[in-house]
Image (tube, coloured by chain):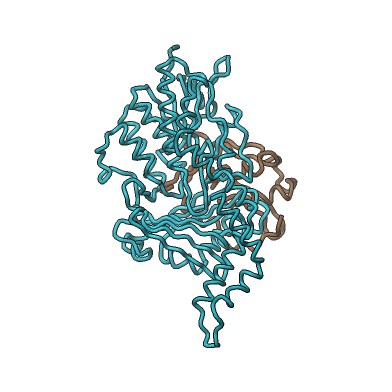
Amino acid sequence: MEERDFDVIVVGAGCAGAVAAYVAAKQGKTTLLIDRGEYAGAKNMTGGRMYAHALKKVIAKYEGEDFDWENDNPFERKITHERLCLLDPQSAVTFDHSSDNLRKPTSDSYSVLATTLDQWLCDKAEEAGAELIFGIPVEELVKDESGAIIGIRAGEDTFTCHAVILAEGQNALLAERSLGVPRTKDNQMAVGIKEVFELDSKTIEDRFLCPEGEGAAMLFVGDCTHGVVGGGFLYTNKTSISLGLVATIKELSESDTTIYQAFDDFKKHPAVAPIIRGAKMVEHSGHMVAEGGYNSIPETCYDGCLIAGDAANLCMNLGYQVRGLDFATATGQFAAEAVCAAIDAEDVSKAGLASYKVAMDSSFVTQDMRTFKDWPSTMEHWESMFTDYPKMLGEIFDCLFVVDGKPQEHLVKRLMPIIKKRGLFKTGKEIMKAVKSL
Amino acid sequence: MKTLRPITCRVDELISVDKFAVDEENAHIELACDSLSELDAVEFGKLIRVCPAGLYREDENGERAFDYAGCLECGTCRIACADTIVKKWNQPSAFCGVSYRFG
């Protein structure tokens, strides 16, 4: 093969990119990892929680099964409490689930902060031998006369390579401008707004009823977005709380609220305000989240280039489960392994890199995205999920718990009017449709 | 497009806790015309609603404002309006823009 500056160049040092650089360097390839932030994670934001299975697999493969996770990890808290909250202006119904299965080393998940996570992953990539450049935005992917990608341009500098792994994140400018990937539509993309609140460890554990070192994740549906498709999220970190909102861009852009006002109202809701009471807000951030599911995944394989992570819209929001980091980790690994094999076989064409898709298709990445492919459109056309259902649940639970001394009727007599006024048949049909796509 | 409910949140105070290195020389976002009042009302209304840093604004007299300093670089305005009134959206130049400390 022709002489190049590097075997592999990875654009973007987020979760997908840092893992890709780590794997490529571990496989002995000369690797450049370049990111526009002035340090790892500086331009990155996550909700955030990582389901740890994918990271554990890649680390076990390249560091050994006996890797010391206890003393070497990028995690904040192990999530052992899962809460779902249906929010109405007048009520909040919260489910709290805790289970030993959430603690198992094969199905554990952790709250994370992007800067800590990315720094840890970048350290691993650097230890493996990758070269890291920070603070410089890549402006263009460089092509040869056939149109194959052979490098990157950043300002005055051009670096060549055998293959580029594009892990530039959700705002995928290079994919659009250099690879011709269609821009994600406003009904398939959401905007996330998040704040980090400092709070001491003990207060966090007390507020969320968690054992020492463990934490809670919480998702909110309903009034948090004032009826717009979306929801709220909360993750407990070691000494802070990540609290945020996500709303589909199209619906939000036609709604009666700004995202920051909706967030402000959410923070003041009686079910939310006590959580952050007395805590100091130390960061306000914004980030997009792909919400289009399987049908919004672009072509990921090109001559001399693969797309991994958020840049490929690999995110799944089921309302009760939000995933992206495990998809990023796995696709970073798969992309690097495909690139290394293609370089060894001296064929980095689209066909030569096709093992990337095979790896994706035979793993949870494509399979989970495909299983839940109908959920995004179900959600988009299900306004009552975000307005009336939380209210209905509030009314139902009021029937159980509100006592005013007047003689009561049997519970079923009190409940039926609540469901009947929404139409028994309509409600049942909506719920069945949702259950099928979940 | 629905009428906006009253905005009581002071978003400037929120983004003031973040760390920025503003590129004074070069605006990484540019709108279709310098005179904001000439921009399409519906499109500008979208930007007001979706920007998590509140960089696009309109006061009670209809006076509009936009400032790229304070941008969180999420790209939401690009997805909302790149086909209409967001004319240019590039990443800020080297070592410029927001630097998250938590993320």
Q: Is residue A150 left or right of residue B44?
A: left
Going 58% across and 74% down the picture, which residue do you hit? A415
Going 39% across and 48% down the picture, which residue do you hit? A112
The answer to which image quadrant residue B7 occupies is bottom right
Going 63% across and 62% down the picture, which residue do you hit? A427
The answer to whether residue A92 shows anywhere in this view is yes
User: A404 or B62: which is nearer to us?
Assistant: A404
For this orientation, the residue located farthest to the top is: A2
Image mark count: 0
The colour one sees for chain A in the rendered image is: cyan
In the depicted structure, whether residue A354 falls above or below residue A386: above
The answer to which image quadrant residue A176 occupies is top right
The answer to which image quadrant residue A346 occupies is top left
The answer to whether residue B55 shows anywhere in this view is no
For the colour brown, the matching chain is B
- Image quarter where the N terminus of chain A lies is top left
Q: Residue A395: percent from the left, percent from the top?
A: 57, 72
Q: Residue B14: percent from the left, percent from the top?
A: 51, 56
Q: Is residue A193 left or right of residue A71?
A: right
User: A130 or A282: which is nearer to us?
Assistant: A130
Q: Residue A158: percent from the left, percent from the top?
A: 49, 21
Q: Residue A251: percent from the left, percent from the top?
A: 65, 52
Going 59% across and 39% down the picture, which residue do you hit? A295
User: A367 or A64: which is nearer to us?
Assistant: A367
Q: Is residue A335 left or right of residue A148?
A: left
